[in-house]
Image (tube, rainbow, N blue to C red):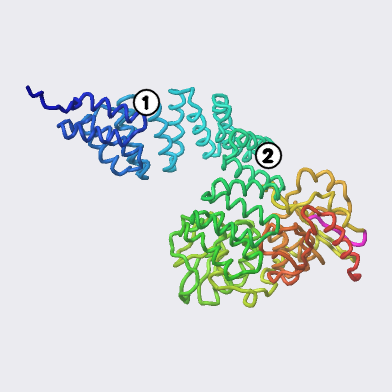
Amino acid sequence: MPGKDARVNRPSPAQLLERAVAAFEAGRFHETESACRALAAAGRDGFEVRYLLGLAAERTGRAAEAVALLSEAARLNPAHPETRFNLGVALARLGRLDEAVAAYDGAIALRAGFADAHFNRGAALGALGRAEEALAAYGRAVALAPADPQAHHNLGTTLASLRRFDEALGPFDRALALDPRYARAFASRAGALFHLGRLDEALASCDRAIAADPRASEAWDCRALVLLELDRPAEALESAERAVAIGPGEANAHYHRGNALRELARFEEAIAAYERAITLDPRHAAAHRNLADVLLLCGDFARGWEAYAGRWRISPGGARPDITAPAWLGGEGLDGRTLLLHGEMGMGDTLQFCRFATQVARLGARVILEAPAPLVPLLRTLEGPAAVIARGEAIPPHDGHCPLMSLPFAFRTDLATLPAAVPYLHADPAREAAWRSRLGPGTRRRIGLAWSGSAGLRNDRRSLSLARVLPMVDAGADWYSLQKAVPARDEALLASRADLRDLGTAFADFADTAAALSLLDLVITVDTSVAHVAGALGKPVWILLPHVPHDWRWFRDGERTPWYPTARLFRQPAPGDWDAVVREVAAAIARLPAR
């Protein structure tokens, strides 16, 4: 008798669903999808199938498909918080962050204690720049999952993004207590310590990150940053190159490598490093700025001004979003138009580049010059501007604007066309008379001295201590301190020196500085605003410079600068060697003819 035909033992829908879930949990996502397709063919194309297919699509990099499937699953089962959470994950991968936040909110509404939803909500809010809201979200995640080191870490990074570095250290330390080999937390902690000026601790934290994970590129990158601040550029370069080797696509690593190369006077290599950083991140403003800085330092004006103009491509409004008039960068005529010129950086930059306002006025423009309040009285002696106003005052109506630092680009300035005629600023006669009375009569050479720059710079390589410059103060001249702010470390020594009369602390503004300088025979200064005032007045000025100048304007070598024809530059022969500079200046003073 013939036997029965062979039968196919088809799995039941329940078995298919179990198989799909098991495959997903084992990471076999194609099997998950195959089982789900079989379920759909059997008429079970409902919530479970859409949900599992959405999860598999998200895990295999098909975020757009995942969003469609998980959105359908959420419609079919609106009370399932995990669906909304995973929909948020897929939306975030597509950069649809506002929608991701809404999805996480939906998950939290269904389950208030959903720690991962609070965590991911914090990540999305942080990426949207809503740091305060991200902070609250991470705070809730930490409260719900106190044993999660990543939640503590992200709470710390958010505090750091708000510049609350002291507070950030606590969450970083808690993350590391939970996971002592959490390399990223060590690196983030190092960053906070760096910003607090605790450089030795920051370096130690970088080293602990690297010990936990030698391939932690962010730790090598942070280590380069710290070593640069510690004036150890050769070691900084080694760390930056490790960061680049591990993460060649990280723009910051190339940027910090460029900074180390610049400090080592390897300028061509620094240029290449900055260019690579910009290729990787065209919006890296610091890389654009430093690339321009090194190009200009090397005298490459054509490429330097163009690179500096790169900041306009990053932010068309520049650093002044309150100015809505169109930017003028050369090209179109200005006859009859009103142009607002405004500074972007420090006092010295404004003093140096205000000379271009005269050129703008000669093109037929009515020029309004905006500047920091202490500069306004002095800048009103400049030929060209119809009005000089203090930053913060109401800005008069105008047709266009240009930052002062962009004017060389607008005029396509090179060494042949650089406006070098001095003086272009002048002392006020009334103030000059007042300072002449204050100084009294004298027959000896009068020399002014400024040895320290801005107190706001944490690692100010351009400044000296008063004790270090005193060997140049000889008995054959009358010497005057031009320090508007005397560093605390130098106050007692200055007070004890009858041969160095304090003038600078009595300066009310830069018009006073100019009036006092106009009565001196020579100004000796480090790279600070005093150098620019003296140069703009056409006074003899000797400028003391570090081995690699703080600013590009002094170029990479030479005794002269085209910006200030009456200036003479004295450069460190090696990094940090101020004593050689002081000896050279003292010898030059001794060679001066009698007054």
**Which residue has dot 1 on it?**
114
Q: Hey, what amino acid is under mark 1? A: Phe
**Residue nearest the viewer, comparing 595 with 31:** 31
Mark 2, other Cα within 10 Å: few <14 / some 14–19 / many ≥20: many
Q: Which label was assigned to residue 199?
A: 2
**Residue 315 seen in the current view:** yes
The stretch in magenta equals 475-481
Q: Position of residue 381 (x, y in %)?
A: 64, 68
User: Residue drawn at (52%, 77%), measured in percent from left and top?
Assistant: 363
Residue that appears at 88% across and 57% down:
473
Quarter placement of the N terminus: top left
Q: Is residue 85 left or right of residue 256?
A: left
In the rendered structure, find residue 483 and report the number of the disc placed on it.
none
Image quadrant in which you'd find residue 406: bottom right
Mark 1, other Cα within 10 Å: few <14 / some 14–19 / many ≥20: many
Decide if residue 163 is on the left or right side of residue 141: right
- Can you give x and y, in whole percent of width and height, for residue 224 in the image? 64, 46
Residue 242 relative to residue 87: left or right: right
